[in-house]
Image: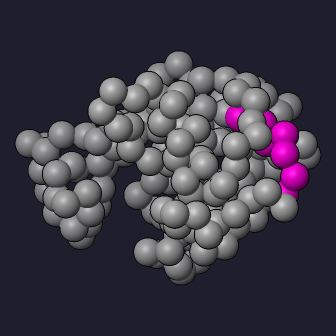
Amino acid sequence: MKNNILPLRTGVGAIVLNKNNKVFVGKRRDNPGKNWQMPQGGVDKGESCIEAMKRELLEETGIKNIEILKEIDRWIEYELPDYLLGKIWKGKYRGQKQKWFIVRFIGKDEEINLQTSHPEFIEWKWIEAENLPNVIVKFKKKLYENLLPEIKKIID
């Protein structure tokens, strides 16, 4: 049963497209199994969503050469599964409400650096957008399915 007393964490996400319209995904350090995800993270106090997205992207991937193509106009939420409640984010949140951005990576792949001061990923790759729901952890699958039509508007 969900703990609806806990709030949702405010976060951002970056859908990073390369010149071939493939999407950046990384394999998380803390969950190095078969799952991948797009860069995402929390919004710091006093920070705008765009600032947070750029900061998270830089902290997690070293990517800074981007062009913002679209800010998705709605918040997209997900709830943590029961087994994770109380274990992540110091137990303060039951899930996240996220503002997502679609950005074009205008740099070179050699610029991508996972060995940052806040390393989150151990591996990265470019994948076809339609494969996104198949690579994410199960509890975020619906979120990724909701992002797919927004991505397709840009790449189709």
The count of marks equals 0
* The image quarter in which residue 149 lies: top right
Q: Residue furthest bottom?
A: 33
Give residue 16's position: percent from left, percent from top: 71, 44
Asked if residue 105 lies left or right of residue 60, the reply is: right
The residue at the point 17 percent across, 58 percent down is 91
Q: Residue at x 73, y 25 (%)?
A: 69
Q: Is residue 66 left or right of residue 3?
A: right
Is 14 positioned to the left or the right of 47 in the image?
Answer: right
Q: Nearer the viewer, residue 25 or 66?
A: 66
Q: As displayed, is residue 92 above or below residue 53? A: below
Q: Quadrant of residue 7?
A: top left
Q: Which residues are magenta?
A: 103-109
Rendered view: 138 above or below 128:
below
- Quarter that holds the N terminus: bottom left
Way the structure is coloured: one colour
Q: State yes or no: residue 8 in magenta.
A: no
Residue at 74% over, 36% down: 66
> What residue is at 66 percent from the left and 55 percent from the top?
62
Residue 147: image quadrant is top right
* Residue 105 included in the magenta stretch of the image: yes
The answer to whether 68 appears left or right of 52 in the picture is right
Query: Given the current orientation, which residue lies at the most extreme front position?
Result: 117
Q: Is residue 23 visible?
A: yes
Question: Does residue 146 sit above or below 29 in this rendering?
Answer: above
Image quarter hosting the C terminus: top right
How far across and down, in percent of the image, does residue 133 sit?
60, 54
Q: Check the image and report above or below for 1 versus 27.
A: above
Res. 142 in view: no
Name the residue at the top extreme.
Answer: 73
